[in-house]
Image (spheres, rainbow, N blue to C red):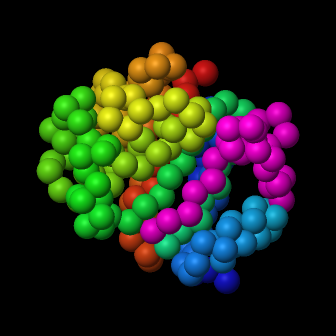
């Protein structure tokens, strides 16, 4: 049984669960499924674009950085978890552009900032299931150390984004919620 578990009540009647998990992708997916079953969450089904849904609501799943995370909400939600690492610096040109400068102005030029930008964009992509360009798809409107407000450019939807630092193992969790 994992040492540290997450259980968070989120804005807009959403909830999030998570726990540490490492190993191959197949083990992470099995751990995600088992965690959801343990807390009595329904098994998600998938829309044609691959986006998971539960019953009448929305859900988002993520595994990375040594964690598995699941969130469900009556309104669109996306989550992503990742450990900061050198591969983010190597991939930077594919997901950080001039429109991300407001984030870098607040968080600085470092791996943690890159990880926050990456996880936020992944979480926003999961809100919609498609149609978010990683270089030009977000317009940052307000950025703080642990949260931001951004608009998905194509969808013209404002999102609240929050970042959480997880420990044991260390990773960044981003949660994106479309405003109702």
Q: Is residue 149 visible?
A: no
Residue 117 at x, y percent in the picture:
33, 45
Where, quadrant-wise, is the N terminus in this rendering? bottom right
Numbered range of the magenta stretch: 40-65
Q: Residue at x 58, y 78 (%)?
A: 24
Relative depth, front residue between 43 and 35? 43
Does the stretch in magenta take in 106?
no
Please state if 171 lies on the left or on the right of 34 as rendered.
left
Identify whether 77 is placed above or below 87.
above
> Quarter-wise, where is residue 142 in the image?
top left
- For the residue pair 59 and 4, the one nearer the viewer reads as 59
Q: Quadrant of the C terminus?
A: top right
Note whether residue 91 is visible: yes
In the image, 122: left or right of 104?
A: right
**x and y percentages locating residue 170 in the rendered image:** 39, 71
Q: Nearer the viewer, residue 13 or 41?
A: 41
| Figure label count | 0
Q: Is residue 33 above or below residue 14?
A: below
Q: Residue at x 83, y 59 (%)?
A: 40
Name which residue lies at 57% across and 41% down: 126
Quarter of the image for residue 55 reads top right
Within the image, what quadrant is residue 39 found in? bottom right
Note whether 51 is above or below 113 in the view shown.
above
Residue 111 in picture, x, y percent from top left: 23, 59
Residue 179 x %, y %: 55, 24
Left or right: 180 in relation to 52: left
Above or below: residue 146 compared with residue 97:
below
Per the image, is 42 magenta?
yes
């Amino acid at each position: 049984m994992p040492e540290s578990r997450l259980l968070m009540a989120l804005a807009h009647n959403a909830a999030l669960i998570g726990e540490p998990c490492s190993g191959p992708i197949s083990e992470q997916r099995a751990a995600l499924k088992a965690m959801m079953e343990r807390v009595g969450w329904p098994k998600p089904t998938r829309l044609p674009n691959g986006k998971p849904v539960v019953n009448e609501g929305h859900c988002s799943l993520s595994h990375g950085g040594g964690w598995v995370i699941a969130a469900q909400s009556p309104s669109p939600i996306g989550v992503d978890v990742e450990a900061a690492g050198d591969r983010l610096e190597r991939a930077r040109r594919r997901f950080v552009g001039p429109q991300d400068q407001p984030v870098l102005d607040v968080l600085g030029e470092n791996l943690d900032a890159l990880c926050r930008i990456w996880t936020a964009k992944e979480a926003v992509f999961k809100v919609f299931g498609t149609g978010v360009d990683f270089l030009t798809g977000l317009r940052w409107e307000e950025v703080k150390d642990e949260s931001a407000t951004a608009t998905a450019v194509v969808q013209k939807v404002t999102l609240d984004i929050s970042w959480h630092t997880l420990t044991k193992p260390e990773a960044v969790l981003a949660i994106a919620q479309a405003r109702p």
